[in-house]
Image (cartoon, coloured by chain):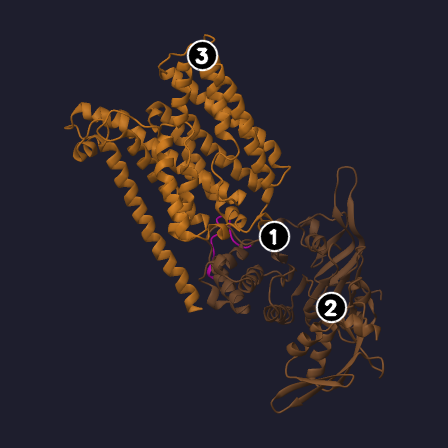
Amino acid sequence: MVTMKRTAEGGARQRKVIFVLLLCALIAVAMLSICLGSSLLPLGDVLGAIFGDKSVNPVIGQIVVEFRLPRVLSAMLGGGALAVAGLLMQTVFRNPLADPYVLGVNAGASLGVALVLLVLAPTGVALTDSLGLSGQLLIVVAATSGSIAALSVVLVFARKVDVMSLLIIGLMMSYVVGALVSILMFFSMAERLQTFFIWSYGDFGNVSWSQMRVFGPAIVLGLCATIVLIKPLNALLLGEHYAESLGTRVKPVRIAILVVASLLAGTVTGFCGPIGFLGIAAPHLCRYLFKSGSHAILIPGSILMGAILALSADMLSKVPGVDVALPLNAITALVGAPVIIVALVRQRNLKRVFG
Amino acid sequence: MSEPKGMSDRGLLNADELGIGYGGKKRDHWVAKGLNLELPAGCLVCLLGPNGAGKSTLLRTLAGMQPPLAGGVEIGGESFATLSSRERARRVSVVLTDTLPTGMLTAYALVALGRHPYSGWLGRLTAKDHERIEWAIQAVGAEDLAGRQVYELSDGERQKVSVARALAQEARVMLLDEPTAYLDLPRRVELMGLLRELAHRESMGILLSTHDLDVALRFADRLWLMEADGSVLEGVPEDLALSGDFARIFASERVDWDVELGSFRAHREVCLKVRIEGEGSGVLWTRRALARLGFGESKVGGTEAFLIEVNRSESGWKWRVQRGDDSIEFFSIGSWVAWIQSKDWSIGKEQ
């Protein structure tokens, strides 16, 4: 009896330490990310600019507040959102390879963007070549509508079929939509394609303060919604049959989880482009760190982990000191994939963990 | 007899004119209909039947995981259909064949999931919940496993923890779908003993499906025998064995259930007979070895191909095989089995 309680308490203390460490790491990476960039800023000036110190050089203040701060904020929110979306999908589908996009939201978003960039723009819809502010907003609207359209199609099936079929339907939808995008690309001009490619690389730097007023609340709202899903998500760890036997109303819960996860992923895709990999990696790293499957631990853990990973990837993509930005998606995969492989090899039992 | 039938007269779980199966678009696929069943309190009931008879369908329907095609299930005097899913979960717990579980989860955390029907919307556990969880873990004797990850557990340990999870649900009815599959004999006996004890001590109604007839016959308070057509015979195990129902339901071309032995017997075409002399367990195992090789036993003298005499000496068992005038001694079953296999008996048959 004593040992049972002691085991539980010992684990809790260890987890608190990990949470504190992750939080410290997040703050450190965020600060570093603001300081580094095409021009290196001293930490003192950065802190001064953030906390409204008047003595800071106004140019530095402007760089920090207008450019670097929203970028860091959107990376944190976006990374956290993708990580949580990935976690929800992995639990619902009981599949370690599920990512936030399994239902085809990024395919839908890319079709929306492709339609705007490759079809509407050449036919004379006002859109500056260099993607001005209005153009950027148009892309956000196109991507978000594309995500919502894809999600709506899949949700029509969600009530009728089991999760495995749903996974396959999502996959097939992605293929069909991907094919449509390829056809559009085939008939497009090179410079249009270039714009589309740049969008598809993903970028946390596109979210301005005015867009943040939509992006921020949408993500925070989605993350808050997951709190009510913690209990049913934990029940779903046992599979849908057991969850039902524990009094969980599986079908409405399943749809709620899919909607929340897809909206989180869709919002990030809309504003920052289809950022891959974070959503699969962060939940796995959290399970490995916390040695727990409870969503009460994994959801906050994934938010922190996702934010840290996104910030780090963004920082690396900017290549400190150089005026070149690498594609974000290349960084997330290049750095993240080996990390996951190492984690899996050391954890070895991932397959058994997922039954 | 005019007395109204109170709750106490009936079982914890009752099926009335229950029809089970799968609803189809054009027409329903019926597995069984007109089932009247009663799961009494303080009773371990085993559901037996050949593969495909519909045991799992019946269990799922009784657990409310699948809607009945006709009739209804009543639990503690209330119709299952009118209960909310949370209320159902407080009355019936299940142990399924589904794989357990995804993600990292300790055995303690797994058992704790059994408290879901009682916890609030956040799933926070109270001291009373923890008390019940620890009680459940102790009841199945899994104290040592509490801190271990579920995926590390052996099949037997995992099954124990699954039962503990169901117990934590504090439901008076527990339904288990083939809980003894994949377990070795000692583990099966242990689990069945545990379930019977729980049923009696906690006055629960426990129903489990199994393919393990021997263990079911020894441990169940009652049996539900499901026939291939879906009808269910109900009774005390010994009655069903004596009446021949047991033998009838499980008979097949290759094996049948022997009421004398109380176990299965494979029947084969016997071409040669052997006479066995001797006493004790040595004779029993000699007989089984011969049956495995395809030899019958000759009870009357003169029809046998050879004679085996089983003796017990101070140094151990001893077999003397006599064939015609030859007489050879063996000191293990393996050695005379090898000797028999080295001979060509088709020639002996012609003689």
Q: Is residue B256 above or below residue A299?
A: below
| Badge 1 or badge 3: first in the primary sequence | 3
Residue located 56% across and 42% down the image:
A253
Spatial distance from mark 2 to mark 3, Cα to Cα? 76 Å
Residue B107 located left or right of residue B335: left
Give the class, few, some or many, for how many residues have Cα within 10 Å of label 1's Cα (few <14, many ≥20): many
Residue range corresponding to the magenta coloring: B118-127
Looking at the image, which is closer to me, A326 or A210? A326
Which residue is disc 2 drawn over? B222
Considering every residue shown, the one lying at the far left of the view is A55
Residue B258 is at least partly visible in this image: no
Q: Chain of mark 2?
A: B
**Count of residue discs:** 3
Looking at the image, which is closer to me, B63 or A274? A274
What amino acid type is highlighted by mark number 2?
A: Arg
Dots 1, 3 in contact, CB < 8 A? no
Residue located 48% across and 65% down the image:
B145
Residue A84 is at least partly visible in this image: yes
Percent position of residue B126, x then y: 47, 58
Which residue is disc 1 drawn over? A245
Which residue is disc 3 drawn over? A121
Q: Is residue A197 above or below residue B235?
A: above
Spatial distance from mark 1 to mark 2, Cα to Cα? 25 Å
